[in-house]
Amino acid sequence: MLIAGRYRLLDLVGRGGMGRVWRARDEMLHREVAVKEIVPPSWLADPERAEARSRTMREARAAARLNHPAVVRLYDVVAVEGSPWIVMEYVPSRTLQDVVDAEGPLEPSRAARIGLAVLDALEAAHTAGVLHRDIKPQNVLVAHDGRVMLTDFGLATFDGGDGAMTRPGMVFGSPQYVAPERAAEGVSTVAADLWSLGATLHAAVEGQSPYARSTAMATLSALAAGPPDPAPHAGALAPVLDGLLRRDPRERLDHETARRLLRTAAAGRADPPSASDRPSADGPVPLPVGQPATDDPDDLDPTVPLPDPAAPGDASPGPAPDPAAVGRTARRVAVVAVALLVAVVAGVATALTVADDKPRDTTGWSTPGPNRPPNGGPLGPGPPPRGRNVPPPPFACVRPDVVGSPVQAGAPTPGDELRPPPGWVWYADTAGFRVSVPATWVFSRDGTVACFQDPATGRAFSVAEGGAADPLKRLRTARETAAGEGALPGYDEIRLATGDDGAEWELRWQTPHGTWLHARQQVLGGDRWTLGWITRDEDWAGAAADWQLVRKSFRPPR
């Protein structure tokens, strides 16, 4: 596909809830570029879709102000069917979140070097009058050539721009990386960006943010009054985290002091900050950009209960805060909570990005089985998280571990002309259906659903019987049920439509383990059987041939 008569889309390199990023070729200058396409979810109302387009232009205008080696460069903005597409520098890379997910928490010195690059990018932005407002591991790129770059200025505000893009009671950003004063009052400052940098570095060395909780509400509650979680692996980075994660923005490290401490940590030393390293408590507060998200929250008396920040698993022990201060801060956070609840009830996108919450103390989805591979499970790397408040999986047969027994080879349907490829067998189920799968797969049941899974890749196939006569209605009901249970964090709907006398639902979502999964549920209209296919998102294309063979071989009872 050629857009704007110049940029040829080559392959999809990233996808999120609001759009896609393509690797493309600039046919005029003969170079690779990245093209960001905005694709708002189909369920968004027209005002929210217009807001997504406005965010695209905000990102472009903010990035256009900056010329720094640690900021992804903007090349062009083109209109395609009335929507803006951003053309940017193409940086072969992984996000910092991808690095932590794949390699585990980083050594403090490596995290400090990454922090220095992000700090340089931030200072360049702040000098240009730009506040990023969405600093988190997902927006830090670690390039294959060693560079570290800051990206995604979609929530940025800037001098002379069009305001803070807020509505009453709403704060934009990811709850685990939003500064306490932003969550409480909705005001963006330089100090708030620096707090988010501290939370990002905490996640780099500890594997999760300092306020990682199982839900956005629990995160906001902890943020309202509790101290950040300890960072026992911070080592030489500890003084930086301590200085950036100060609750009072006037006591937070500034650019210069943060840089000095990061350089020290990058060299493997830990020099504690001196009293002169922080702005005076009586000094000026950095000027906010935009307006508070609410009028004086202390004058409000919301009755929405917030989770107890001292509850087990939701806050780390620390000194008891001043009761009056806790009351004021909790009331402010309750205002944000009210907005979140109203938005969810109304069925619109909430401004605080719940999808970025990664459980700190949660329960796994299944009991580890005997066939668990060394890497911890194809669909969920590492041991299953334990504790409370983990949503159920959206479908049957979604497990972080491979469980089951070897598939028992059976006979094909009499007269069937399909010949499975070498290494595949026919399986005959007690429910009457037959299907061909690789002989190395294992079989199990999740309730009444038959589950088949590849121990090597985690690819899973499921067969369920029965359901509503209307295939599309059945899938829509399944979607609403899963969403209502919080089982689809980061939900990305790719397709939900009728076809082939049935209906199909294709989607992506993020598990409590941080893994992105890609799935389809296909309801066969005439027989009312539902076939499921689940893989890691990065394995979706590679697994397509297996899906076609399995789907083609499925034989319902006669």
Image (cartoon, rainbow, N blue to C red):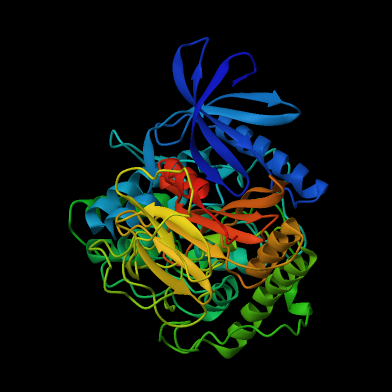
Q: Quadrant of the C terminus?
A: bottom right
- The residue positioned 41% from the left and 58% from the top of the image is 200
Where in the figure is residue 397, as x and y percent of width and height? 47, 67
Left/right of residue 170 with respect to residue 21 in the rendered view: right
Left/right of residue 506 with respect to residue 452 in the rendered view: right
> Looking at the image, which is closer to me, 270 or 79?
79
Where in the figure is residue 299, as x and y percent of width and height? 78, 78
- The residue positioned 25% from the left and 63% from the top of the image is 373
Where in the figure is residue 109, as x and y percent of width and height? 23, 54
- The residue positioned 32% from the left and 66% from the top of the image is 206
> Looking at the image, which is closer to me, 513 or 325?
513
Relative to 339, residue 222 above or below: below
Which residue ends up furthest to the right in the rendered image? Answer: 46
Relative to 523, residue 487 above or below: below
Relative to 87, residue 27 above or below: above
Whether residue 409 is visible to the viewer of this picture, yes or no, is: yes
